[in-house]
Amino acid sequence: MDRFVSTFTNRLDAKGRVSVPASFRTLLAKDGFDGVYVYPALGIPALDAGGNRLVEEINSLVEQLPPYSEERDHLSAALYGDSEVLRADGEGRIMLSDRLRAHAGITDRVTFVGLGYKFQLWEPEQFVARQEEARARVRELKQLLGSVPSGMAGQSSGVGE
Amino acid sequence: MDRFVSTFTNRLDAKGRVSVPASFRTLLAKDGFDGVYVYPALGIPALDAGGNRLVEEINSLVEQLPPYSEERDHLSAALYGDSEVLRADGEGRIMLSDRLRAHAGITDRVTFVGLGYKFQLWEPEQFVARQEEARARVRELKQLLGSVPSGMAGQSSGVGE
DNA sequence: TTGACCCCCATTGACGCCCATGATAACCCA
DNA sequence: TGGGTTATCATGGGCGTCAATGGGGGTCAA
């Protein structure tokens, strides 16, 4: 599996350390990134995190905007300026800065949520609420799509060959 | 046979393990997926499960949406975030997390239902009820259609063992 | 010197790995 | 064809390993 998947909730210890879920660590390592790239997610009380894959996504996003434009400067500032590269200790734990913790409202526990090419860090309670909303949206979306994406066609008939 | 077919009901042991039906295992192996990819089915008390084929479908579904959109993050969270990659032990058994068991109402037994390119996990009683309903729907449909596409005859019986 | 951070070790519980049992179905041979 | 044998699969349980967590203490820098 080459994607961040599933959710895990871990505790911050007295020193402010949290274990990054083992499966996320192995994926980051496979991605060739030593540590975790983290920044405050735009518009929501969560942190976006990932490895090289995420960094590249961000780079290409910024580069899509016209050079020297206001927009580009703002986006660069928001993404690059607030980013941090966190190193993990021997046990795979990281420390979140005050700023990062404040943005997500994290105090003593963190929920790690896999989103494919990246993952997010949430304060557990807020995540529950958010996830409810996400699921509701998806149900809507499913109905709207009605016509099912190509890969799904032909499934219901079920009787193979 | 390159499809998940038929229905099997297996028991969870004291450790919470269930055997994945042997025929499903061989199919997963053929698909090159080590383990089982599982997530709560949308809108119904069951779990969707499968291998690479299912994963591909989810990936393409997510990738249809514009990157960085709110919509995409929601979908990713609902699909990837709720998914789990379950590894099987030497005997082909998996363990379902509390979250997954809760969604499907599974306690001590699980019904595996082949659906072609994927399969579902149900609490046995709920599956029976569901199946009744499905048969009724098919009868309706039959009347509406007048005639049924040739491939479909005889499939629904499928209650294993 | 003090505090922040890093490296190392200990603990605990969950999970993976391995072997045993029983039951059923496929198989073989006289 | 009948009886016994083997293979396959679901199931149970012991035990080692690893992940998550907790804490000591060294090191570097302000």
Image (cartoon, coloured by chain):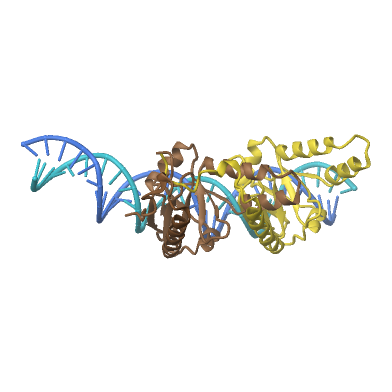
Chain colours: A yellow, B brown, C blue, D cyan
Q: Quadrant of the C terminus of chain A?
A: top left
Q: Residue at x 60, y 51 (%)?
A: A6
Quarter occupied by residue B14: bottom left
Q: Please name the residue shown 40% across and 41% down the image.
A: B26
Rendered view: B90 above or below B127: above
- Pick the front one: B88 or C21: B88
Horizontal and vertical percent position of residue B86: 51, 49
Left or right for A73, reference A33: right
The x, y position of residue B125, in whole percent, is 42, 65
Q: Residue B6: give x, y in percent of width and height.
A: 38, 50
Left/right placement of residue B15 relative to residue A91 reads: left
Residue A5 seen anywhere in this rendered image of the structure: yes
Can you name the residue that lies furthest to the front here? B146
- Residue A19 can be seen in this image: no
Above or below B130: residue A119: above
Q: A60 or A154: nearer the eye? A: A154
In the image, B70 versus B153, the foreground residue is B153
B94 sits left or right of A128 in the view: left
Task: Specify the quadrant of the image occupied by residue D24.
Answer: bottom right
